[in-house]
Amino acid sequence: MKPAARYREAGVDLRAAELAKAKISEVVAAARSDLALGGVGAFGGMVRLPPDIPDPVLVMSTDGVGTKVLVAARAGRHDTVGEDLVNHCVNDILVHGARPLAFLDYIATASVDPDTVASVVEGVARGCRAHDMTLAGGETAEMPDVYQEGVYDLAGTILGVVSEGEALHGDRIRVGDLLLGYESTGLHTNGYTLARHIVFERLGLDVDSTVPELDVSIADALLAPHRSYHAAVAPVLGRMHGLAHITGGGIPGNLVRPLPAGCVAAVDSSQWVVPPLFSFLQEAGGVERDEMLRVFNMGIGMIAMVPSDALAPVQDAARAAAVPTWVIGEVVRGGGAVPGVRID
């Protein structure tokens, strides 16, 4: 028996892995910015620092898309979760004022299906191209003893840059700043374990099912792409005092993160209409309001802390990027040194 046959018998198919690499290489080659260095397929990816940024500071973040991949696998749609991953990571460094430079993806699975992997990476590459960011490389790991057959995990690492004097840390946030909420496009990449339990287990629905509360299929509702706020926010970063990306932990778990000591973010939940998907999940799952707020974004994917005299241009930038916004509250003085969030 040849070594490759022994490895395949143990659960790893080298031929499939090589075919996947060949498909990926074509995709990666088309997702390189002018700052990229080196060749595709090298041991490490290289990217220059932009020459127009004084006192550059690198900003890095790693994240995944959670169990949204199980919905993608169930629906047989694999390209959107790759774009979700990029947009999530872009938003995570955007809150610090950073411009995206390079991205790395990691796909782990029980056995490599070349077409599935290529589809996932095509979504990653599409997200990178949309942000003029280099897809600098990645890794596909085949681990049959760790993962179940037919599923995969997806994670990514982003590298961005910001001028040190323009970086957002939350220290500029002041009492009286307005809270500007940016519309989400569904669940984004959080809360899928609970959503899947409600939809597939409690209700017995499948990805092609439809319900009266939603005007799209379950697959379309749950696989709606995680919105990138880069185009809406980047042109007016200098007018903002802080930003919060609303991911796992919802509004209360994320809005508190940039707040300085002694400040409370007072949110008025009547200022935006909660999208039907969240109302459907809450009613069908019997989920309490407090838990909904801590699991899901409830229709708000990003919140900016903006001085009142900058509100108009900030909203204009969002409008130009076709992202609806609402003034959903303000920063008020807290009763103690610890920052907090209050949602009415």
Image: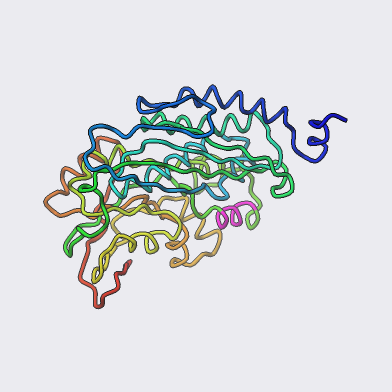
**Residue at screen point 51% across, 60% down:** 283
Q: Quadrant of the N terminus?
A: top right
**Residue at screen point 26% across, 51% down:** 326
201 sits to left or right of 283: right
Q: Residue 19: x and y, percent?
A: 66, 25
Q: Is residue 182 above or below residue 113?
A: below
Q: Looking at this view, is 258 or 50 the one in front? A: 50
Q: Is residue 217 above or below residue 304?
A: above
Figure label count: 0
Instruction: Look at the magenta stretch and give its main secondary structure.
Output: helix
Q: Looking at this view, is 249 or 275 the one in front? A: 249
Q: Residue 218: x and y, percent?
A: 56, 44
- Residue 257 appears in which quarter of the rendering? bottom left
Q: Residue 58: x and y, percent?
A: 34, 44
Q: Quadrant of the C terminus?
A: bottom left
Q: Looking at this view, is 38 or 154 the one in front? A: 38
Residue 164 among those drawn in magenta: no
**Residue at screen point 66% across, 43% down:** 151
Give the residues drawn in magenta, as a range: 193-200
Q: Residue 98: x and y, percent?
A: 30, 43
Q: How is the image coloured?
A: rainbow
Q: Is residue 59 above or below residue 115?
A: below
Instruction: Kindly give the residue lying farthest to the right in the view shown.
Output: 1
Instruction: Kindly give the residue lying farthest to the left in the view shown.
Output: 309
184 sits to left or right of 147: left
